[in-house]
Amino acid sequence: MDSLPKPEVILTHESDLDGLLSGLLLVRLAKARFDADVPLEAYHYNLWKQRPMTERAAWVSDFTFEPRLDRPNWLVLDHHTTDAIPRQARLIHDPAKSAALLCYELCRDAGLATPALDRLVHLSDVADLFLEDDPDFTPANDYASLVKVYGFWNLHALIGGDAEKLLNHPLLEVMAVKHRVEDPLGYEWSRANVRRVSAQVGFVDTTIGNINFIVHKLLEQQATPFPVLVTFFVKGNRTVIASFRSRNGDALKVAQRFQGGGHPNAAGATLPRHVQNPQDAVEYLRLTLDPPATSAAPLNNLGSLFAAAEAKR
């Protein structure tokens, strides 16, 4: 704990509960350790890729460790697969733990553990690592849906940056009703409306219901011929987020084709600005993953071309 650098900023992933919770935990740890209100910044993958890393000291959670983060006085806590080797930064890395759990272990060492945080971190771990055999899998995904439905900063404002206020939040009643009523209806509709993007990827159209539940069930029951399923989320500014899911580790490989990232079976990517709706997104993915074959130049006329050239001599 004594070796932790005092951060100028705390950086985290904007797209999910793991990013929100790990960011809040690091803000609390910095306050306890340095008596400082360190600003929190959150990014989707595309903006994260473009962000300059100019701070002399920073804490980063829930983003893949890469060479540009290998800076003196930088602390990175993450669980995504990486080939980069830290030479200057301090990396706390474990693929078997969520970023929130890695951050919480530091908080425990600092005496900041609470029963409420124990519960929240466990739920985040189950949802982010998609531990489908865990008895808390369903409520964990309801918690994760809060960020998907209401947005990172909206939820942050609603709880005033106090992570414990997420526990048993009234909005979970909305998630529970949606899960009970909408999910079965949404699953049946989506199962009949899966469209081919490529031989490997299918687009799951959705109307109502928890998208994670629907896609999980489609993959679990092998209800489609596609090993990777993609859904899209359109933000208020028309930015389209693609979410890839699989059971064989191929989701991340597909997301990386679009400068995205994530886990082997749960990954995402922000699509270019000219893609503004799901229809555009399907075409963009199709052209990238399954481009039309280009016809080779015809060879049967080469003989006549040579004959004509000889005749002119």
Image: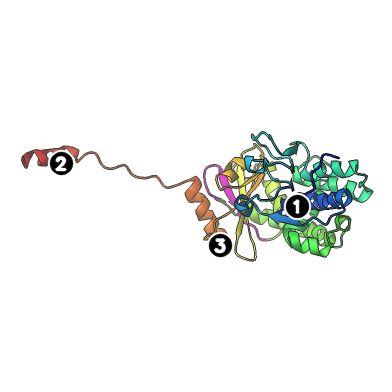
Q: CA distance from mark 3 to mark 2?
A: 48 Å
Give the label, 1 or 2, closer to the camera.
1
Q: Which residue is mark 2?
A: 305
**How is the structure coloured here?**
rainbow
Q: Residue shown at 56%/48% (left/top)?
A: 258
Residue 228 at x, y percent in the picture: 61, 43
| Element assignment for label 2 | helix
Q: Is residue 165 left or right of residue 79?
A: right
Give the label, 1 or 3, closer to the camera.
1
Residue 34 at x, y percent in the picture: 86, 50
Q: Is residue 19 left or right of residue 105?
A: left
Q: Which residue is mark 1?
A: 8
Q: Are marks 1 and 3 in contact (CB under 8 Å)?
A: no
| Mark found first going from the N terminus, 1 or 3 | 1
Asked if the magenta segment contains residue 203, the reply would be yes
Query: Which segment is the magenta one?
Result: 196-207
Compare residues 128 and 11 and report the one nearer the observer. 11
Local crowd at mark 2 within 10 Å, few (<14), some, or many (≥20)? few
Asked if the magenta segment contains residue 101, the reply would be no
Q: Residue shown at 91%/47% (left/top)?
A: 112
Q: Which mark is residue 276?
A: 3
Q: Quadrant of residue 169?
A: bottom right
Q: Residue 210, can we see it? A: no
Q: Quadrant of residue 179?
A: bottom right
